[in-house]
Each structure stands twice: as structure tokens, then as C-alpha cells.
Amino acid sequence: MTQPKLFSTPTFRLILLSSAIFGFSAFAMYGVMDIAINRSMTRQMDAELQNDILTLSDNDGRMDRDRLVARVQGRIARHSRTGTFYLLQDEDGALLAGNLPPMKVPFNGTYDLPSPTSDPEHVLRAAGISLPNGLNLLIARDAYVLDEVADLMERTFGVGVLLTLVAALCSGVLISRRLQQRLETINRTSREIMSGDLGRRIPVNGNDHDFDELATNLNNMLARIEELMDGVRQVSDNIAHDMRTPLTRLRHYLERVRLSGVTVEEFRSAIDIALLSTDDLLEMFGALLRIAQIEARTPCADLQPLDLSALCEMVAETYGPVAESEGHRLASAIVPGLSIAGDKQLLTQMLVNLVENALQHNKTPIEVRILLHLPGNGGGPELTVTDNGVGIAQEEYANVLRRFYRVDASRSTQGSGLGLSMAEAIARYHGASLTLEDNGPGLRVLLRFPGKG
């Protein structure tokens, strides 16, 4: 990862922009605080100077001239090194006492004066008053303390803002580097997947909640894509395998009739057989299309309230005579009044597929049972279709849910190997889980529907 790429990341640019905004805001705040503090300290100094003038002149300003001169000279002697200056002049501007050069009188109010030390960094803050006895009194103090406070604030703010900006930039580099590393991991995994390694997954660190959640969701999506790709590959292989035989058989039969047939009845019989074989193939393609249409729907979309108990009763009543005509028995134990959100046509087709699947793959008499109840764990209804026939080996449970897959024992029976695949697709569309279990003997197909919570 090159440095220019690191500095051009959106995260680093965002942190840089935030740092610039923070720096600008900090300097603006410093300017406002500097003005406010300077004005506050100036007002405080002016108030102290005014109070000092009133104290020195006994508030009324009618003190005897000689006495006031003595007071001013005494103050000068005591405060000669404290940065406080005094000036007392008469109404004509003559200097009576003080350690400041004479000024034009009168001098009322507060203002800044140059320091008598000729130091440009030192400015005096002065307050003057014209007394009722005609004298003019001025007291000034060195305002260097205000400059010291301003310099201290400037240094403190400057260092603080600089350190904050450096910390922000360093954190921006670290965060951007970490972000780039995670993104590069995702990009590298994506490139490997695009190159054909569909089994690759994005690593999950376990200490980064947002990226781990993103990686988990992407991994689930990749697993689903891999599953679909495997399904497409498996369907293609099975179509090539399962359809090749009937199509080859049909072609050989038609070719034999074309070569040896002599009567109209023979040709008509050949056409009838060809039509039946074609119907079987069309039915197989129709089942594939229905599965694809079901899987293309958004799970649990457009479902309506449905009385599942009534639907199971209807299928049990309809297929009871069919089972008896084939030497089997169909029984049911259905709890009434159980409802779900579902598609009646799809659920009917699913239940019919499960019942027909059990009847077709057992030659000897068996009992098929349809069970519907509400478990006590707070979940939704559980629908079970069981039989006591030959069953399926447990190692074949995952395989028989794949399209066109048929165990060796059932290849001689009618069917396309799509019944359980369609049942699972319908169950997934309804948010239900389909599980195959050993019924000892026979097969148990368990469907768990989601609860209403």
C-alpha cells in the first residue's frame, strides 16, 4: 500500500477536513476569548485606577493642595518600583508632583500612554480626573501584564492546537491504514473469487464489529452464490444425464418405427408413445421452471393468512382413497385452527409432493401419516409427513434435496427427482425449515414454520 494511496483515501481526507475545521474553529475561539479577556482585564484595571484616584483624593476632591502633593509624593516613594505612575498638575498645567512628564490639562477619562522608560513593549494604562479645587490628578499603571496574559494564551492555544492537529493527522494515518488493509483483504478475496475460487471467504477478525458484520454478510452472500452455482452445475449435469436416456430411447424407438413400420396403426402408436415421452420431458422442465420461479421470489413476500389445518385436512381427505387404491393407507392427526402466513397453492403442491413421493417409492403396503401440531417452545406449527416404508439412507439426506438426484433404488420408479427439491424451495419461501429424519423404519419429513412473533 503506497503512501499516496493512503493519503488519498476518503477516511484520511475526511479526518484532514475535520482537522482543518477544528483548527479554524479553535483560532476563531482564541480570537474571541483574547478580545473578551483583554477587555475584561482592561475594565478591571480601569476600575482599580478610578478607585485609586478617589482614595487618593479623599473622594470629594476638595483636599488641600499641599496635602495632596504630599500624598502623591509619598505614593511615588512607596511605589517607585511597582510600575505605578502618578501625575499632579494645577489648572495651568504646572507640574506639582509626579514621575510622569507634564501633560495637557485637563485629562479626564481613561486612555493609554507611552511608557516613560521608552520601552515599546510597555504601555501605560492611565486614568485622570479634574478635581473641584482646580487640580488635575492622573494615575497610570504598566499594562505589560495584559500583554503577558495575551502571550500566554497565544502560546497555550498554539501548542494545544498544534498537538491536537498532529494527533488528528496521526490517527487519520492509522485509521486509513487499517481501513485500507481491511478493504485490500476484501478486494484480494474478491479477485480470487472472480478468478474461479468460489470457496474463498473474507476473514473475520472478531474485534471489529462493523467490518466483521460486513464480512459475515458478504460471506453469507458468497455461500449462497456458491450454492446457486453448484445447483446450476448440478442441474446441468443431471439434465445431461437424466434427459439423455429418455431422449436417446425416444429417438431409437422413432427410428426403428420409421425403418420397420408399415401400417398406419403402427405409426399412430409410435406417435402416441412419443407424445407421452414428450409430456414427461415437458413436465420435468415445468417443474424446473416452477422451482426457479419460487426461488426468484422474495422470501415471505405476498403471503396471506392461511388455515394450515384445513389445508392438511383437505389433502388427507383427497389422497386417502388414492392411497387405498394402491394398497397403502393414509392417516392424519391434525390440530385444528392452526394458521400461518402462506401461499395456499404452493403449500398444497408441497404437501401433495411429499405424500406422492412416499406412495410412489414404496411397492409394499405402507402407512403414510400427516401430522400437524403446535410445539410448546413458542415456535410456529410443525408439519410432519411420515411413512414406514424403505426410507432413505442418512448419508443421502442432503443429496435427495438436490434437483434430479435419485437414489439407485428409485431410478426404476416414475418421477424426475424434483419433488423434494420443490418442497424445500416452497418451505424456504415461507421461511420454514425442511428436515429429513429416520422414522425407523421409513422417512420423516419435518417442516417447522416460523412463529407469529
Image (cartoon, rainbow, N blue to C red):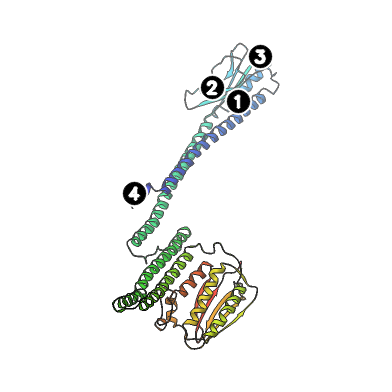
Residue 269 is situated, as x and y percent measured from the top left of the image, at: 38, 78
- Nearer to us of marks 4 and 2 is 4
Whole-angstrom CA distance, mark 2 to mark 3, is: 23 Å
Which residue was labeled with disc 2?
Answer: 113
Which residue was labeled with disc 3?
Answer: 134
Task: Tell whether label 4 touches label 3 (CB within 8 Å).
Answer: no
Whole-angstrom CA distance, mark 4 to mark 2, is: 57 Å
For badge 3, the amino acid type reads Gly
Q: Is residue 43 left or right of residue 122?
A: right
For badge 4, the amino acid type reads Gln
Q: Earlier in the sequence, mark 3 or mark 4?
A: 4
Relative vertical location of residue 148 with respect to residue 327 in this rendering, above or below = above
**On-image quarter of the C terminus:** bottom right
Relative vertical location of residue 56 with respect to residue 386 in this rendering, above or below = above
Crowding at mark 3 (Cα within 10 Å: few <14, some 14-19, many 20+): some
Whole-angstrom CA distance, mark 2 to mark 1, is: 20 Å
Whole-angstrom CA distance, mark 3 to mark 4, is: 78 Å
Q: Is residue 227 left or right of residue 110?
A: left
Residue 382, image quadrant: bottom right
Q: Which of the pair 398/295 is nearer the observer?
A: 295
For badge 1, the amino acid type reads Arg
Relative vertical location of residue 372 with respect to residue 64 in this rendering, above or below = below
Farthest left residue in view: 259
- Nearer to us of marks 2 and 1 is 2
Q: Which mark is residue 75?
A: 1
Which residue was labeled with disc 4?
Answer: 3
Residue 277 is situated, as x and y percent measured from the top left of the image, at: 39, 75
Q: Earlier in the sequence, mark 2 or mark 1?
A: 1
User: Quick one: SS at disc 1?
Assistant: helix
- Nearer to us of marks 1 and 3 is 3
